[in-house]
Image (spheres, coloured by chain):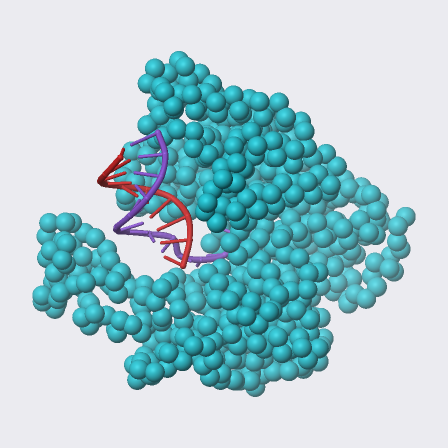
Chain colours: A cyan, B purple, C red
DNA sequence: GTAGTACCTTTTTTT
DNA sequence: AAGGTACTAC
């Protein structure tokens, strides 16, 4: 029909062939890094179609939309026109929730709330619950709620399990959070998995329909699934247990988001008759790189031991380069890259730079523009997080979903319409008991006696504006956006501004219009709702352009699934990788090691592991110790290099602080230690000390936590209660040591 | 009600 | 180092 069997198996090794040829029943593919798993999944899809399975009955789940798009393209190139369902768990969730909206009591036009929307919502829910908002930051509570949803715990169930004070507090907020979501006809990211998972669990008819629809399910990156995703996978694989999962336990790096490595480790227990295949031949990396990766990961205890066999040559040793400062590191890397490219060894797009944290990309930008190295930061300061974009998207979301109160709050007074907090409070007081949205209340503003003058006319105007724009909903997205920009006065506001930043915002907004235009070109039936959904579900890596000839800069998390001939991993320092917050807990530390492993195994030919002795971090310069992971690499494969100071900043620091530097270095402290002010203004603080603070007076130190610039003190004052301080920043007179 | 100013947290990673 | 929040003056 499109290709023959031999073609599908061409160039595959034994294990890969077996995986492709597997037909019915559960299958676990343990696929080491670089073992060609994507290729295997793609070919297996084709093979299933070849033996007569209807494409309609095949579902493939990938980790990002980009991966889904690429897989779709590959399948399409060999079997054009076939509509296999290939998507992420989240997009699948949205699709199911829209399809079954009536059955689930949802309104099809729901908004999808991202992190920052959720944060605002949580803040409101905390207020609703009567909890002290000072005590609980929205993000902490939100994290707990998010974890609860990933565990499929409803507010009631969560409350039953809440034993400690914090959980009990969260349990009070959670129902209000849900109520507020519903009121706005919104779902959060976790809902996109939570509701489908619960539906599959509780609605037998829906479950069996979907199971029969998706008879062959394939899931990539299975090591990073959470309980909700697990429940979806299993719900779809009861009557037709043709579940094929692919993953590598050593690459599980999303625990903070609810991923449970046990899902893959226990697959054979869940499906006792599962076939297990191991792909251990690595086609990507040189032997030197792979042996470094292998040595490192073997320090993890929570794993299935496995061997990776490099099918490549030994290759050059792994470089371990130590710089003086973070600035030297950026400078040195830029210089090396420029040289490599000038010598014709590599082109820019062959090279990637990985960092543990987004904040670390900043120092690179300077150096790269100085050396004229073209680069793309995958994410950086995300486009869709910019104020102007969020403002505009709020208008659009409100158009599609007029109940969306979070979007209303954002859009209503941007540009300023004379509507302040007081008027909005009146508006809320009117809307809430009547169970109507804020936009609808704004339409009735003349019935609200408390709101008058500028605020009243502003709200009225806004309601009319939205009503008029609503007429355009059927037009292509870019037209709606352009019209919104004009009619709202948003564009005009920026155009008239004297602030140079606003000119950039103007440009960003135009970029959104062209993104919408492009969306129209790509989608057959472009709706505004579809455009918004696309944005909501986009991942950082989706923006990565592999064809563009530039160096790719990204976090280690974003690097998953990619490969590059040359890799630089920056800031391999204790406190950064492994991250400070993982040092106390062995499980977290193992995840950091997996993160390092993921980074290392992205490299094909050349791997450079960099660290600096000093790093500018959050305003202060700190000493850093090399990452413990560096000492867990095989010496034989590593080439150590020292690079002297090259930047002005570094030279300056070389001078007078030299002695203290060496001192700080030699103490061998595991974590970063600040250089200035030395060590702390009045020596080391310890618990029990009695101190004097110029504003709060006398108090006792009750807790010392963290290190370096992150060192914090909690002090209980005689009159001012307990407060916490950054040790470096606070001025204290020590009255009595403990 | 708004605009301007001072201060405080934030950043680990993200669909 | 930046953006949000709280406070103040108009």
Q: Is residue A165 above or below residue A317?
A: above
The mark tally for this picture is: 0
Residue A90 is situated, as x and y percent measured from the top left of the image, at 59, 43
Residue A344 or residue A27, whichever sits in front: A344
Q: Residue at x 35, y 23 (%)?
A: A426
Q: Residue at x 53, y 77 (%)?
A: A332
Q: Residue at x 43, y 29 (%)?
A: A417
Residue A245 or residue A324, whichever sits in front: A324
Whether residue A666 appears in this view of the structure is: no
Residue A452 or residue A346, whichever sits in front: A452
Q: Is residue A518 left or right of residue A260?
A: right
Residue A544 is situated, as x and y percent measured from the top left of the image, at 63, 56
Q: Residue at x 46, y 68 (%)?
A: A577
Quadrant in the rendering for residue A59: top right
Q: Is residue A285 left or right of residue A377?
A: right
Q: Is residue C4 above or below residue A254?
A: above
Residue A236 is situated, as x and y percent measured from the top left of the image, at 65, 41
Residue A524 or residue A195, whichever sits in front: A524
Quadrant in the rendering for residue B4: top left
Q: Is residue A704 left or right of residue A402?
A: left
Residue A162 is situated, as x and y percent measured from the top left of the image, at 35, 42
Q: Is residue A274 above or below residue A495?
A: below
Whether residue A388 appears in this view of the structure is: yes
């Amino acid at each position: 029909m499109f290709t023959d069997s031999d073609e599908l198996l061409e160039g595959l090794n034994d294990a890969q062939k077996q995986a492709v040829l597997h037909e019915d029943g559960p299958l676990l593919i343990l696929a080491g890094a670089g073992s060609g798993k994507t290729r295997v999944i793609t070919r297996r899809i084709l093979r299933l179609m070849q033996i007569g399975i209807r494409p309609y009955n095949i579902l493939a789940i990938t980790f990002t939309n980009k991966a889904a798009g690429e897989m779709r393209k590959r399948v399409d190139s060999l079997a054009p026109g076939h509509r296999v369902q290939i998507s992420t768990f989240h997009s699948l969730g949205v699709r199911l929730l829209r399809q079954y909206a009536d059955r689930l009591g949802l309104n099809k036009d729901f908004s999808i709330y991202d992190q920052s929307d959720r944060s605002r919502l949580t803040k409101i829910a905390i207020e609703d619950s009567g909890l002290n908002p000072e005590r609980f930051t929205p993000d902490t509570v939100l994290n707990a709620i998010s974890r609860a949803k990933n565990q499929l715990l409803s507010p009631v169930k969560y409350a039953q399990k809440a034993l400690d004070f914090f959980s009990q507090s969260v349990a009070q907020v959670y129902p209000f959070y849900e109520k507020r979501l519903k009121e706005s006809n919104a779902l959060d990211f976790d809902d996109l998995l939570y509701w489908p998972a619960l539906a599959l669990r509780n609605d037998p008819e829906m479950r069996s329909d979907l199971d029969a629809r998706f008879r062959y399910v394939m899931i990539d990156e299975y090591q990073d699934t959470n309980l909700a995703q697990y429940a979806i996978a299993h719900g779809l694989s009861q009557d037709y247990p043709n579940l094929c999962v692919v993953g590598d336990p050593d690459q599980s790096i999303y625990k903070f988001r609810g991923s449970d490595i046990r899902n893959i480790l226990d697959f054979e227990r869940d499906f006792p008759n599962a076939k297990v295949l191991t792909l251990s031949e690595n086609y990507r990396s040189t032997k030197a790189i792979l042996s470094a990766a292998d040595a490192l990961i073997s320090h993890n205890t929570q794993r299935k031991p496995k061997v990776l066999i490099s099918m490549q040559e030994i290759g050059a040793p792994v470089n371990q380069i130590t710089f003086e400062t973070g600035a030297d590191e950026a400078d040195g890397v830029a210089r090396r890259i420029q040289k490599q490219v000038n010598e014709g060894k590599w082109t820019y797009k062959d090279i990637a730079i990985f960092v543990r944290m987004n904040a670390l990309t900043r120092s690179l930008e300077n150096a790269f523009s100085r050396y004229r190295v073209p680069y793309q930061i995958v994410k950086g300061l995300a486009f869709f997080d910019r104020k102007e974009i969020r403002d505009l998207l709020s208008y659009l979301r409100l158009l599609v979903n007029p109940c969306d109160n979070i979007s209303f709050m954002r859009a209503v007074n941007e540009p300023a319409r004379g509507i302040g907090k007081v008027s909005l409070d009146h508006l809320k007081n009117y809307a809430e008991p009547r169970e109507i949205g804020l936009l609808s209340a704004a339409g009735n503003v003349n019935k609200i006696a408390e709101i008058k003058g500028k605020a009243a006319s502003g709200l009225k105007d806004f309601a009319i504006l939205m009503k008029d724009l609503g007429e355009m909903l059927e037009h292509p997205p870019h037209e709606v956006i352009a019209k919104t920009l004009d009619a709202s006065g948003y564009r005009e506001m920026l155009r008239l501004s004297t602030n140079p930043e606003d000119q950039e915002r103007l440009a960003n907004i135009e970029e959104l219009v062209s993104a919408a235009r492009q969306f129209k070109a790509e989608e057959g039936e472009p709706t505004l709702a579809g455009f918004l959904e696309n944005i909501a579900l986009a991942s950082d890596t989706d923006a990565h352009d592999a064809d563009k000839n530039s160096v790719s800069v990204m976090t280690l998390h974003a690097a998953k699934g990619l490969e590059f001939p040359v890799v630089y991993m920056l800031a391999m320092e204790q406190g950064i990788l492994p991250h400070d917050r993982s040092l106390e807990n062995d499980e977290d530390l193992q995840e950091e090691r997996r993160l390092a492993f993921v980074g290392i195994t992205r490299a094909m030919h050349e791997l450079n592991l960099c660290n600096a002795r000093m790093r500018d971090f959050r305003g202060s310069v700190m000493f850093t110790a090399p990452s413990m992971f560096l000492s867990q690499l095989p010496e034989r494969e590593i080439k150590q290099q020292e690079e002297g100071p090259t930047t002005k900043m570094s030279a300056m620091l070389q001078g007078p602080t030299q002695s203290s530097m060496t001192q700080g270095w030699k103490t061998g402290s595991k974590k970063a230690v600040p250089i200035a002010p030395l060590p702390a203004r009045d020596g080391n603080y310890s618990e029990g000390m009695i101190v004097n603070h110029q504003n709060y007076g006398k108090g006792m130190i009750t807790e010392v936590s963290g290190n370096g610039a992150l060192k914090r003190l909690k002090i209980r004052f005689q009159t001012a209660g307990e407060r916490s301080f950054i040790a470096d920043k606070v001025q204290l007179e020590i009255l009595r040591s403990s």
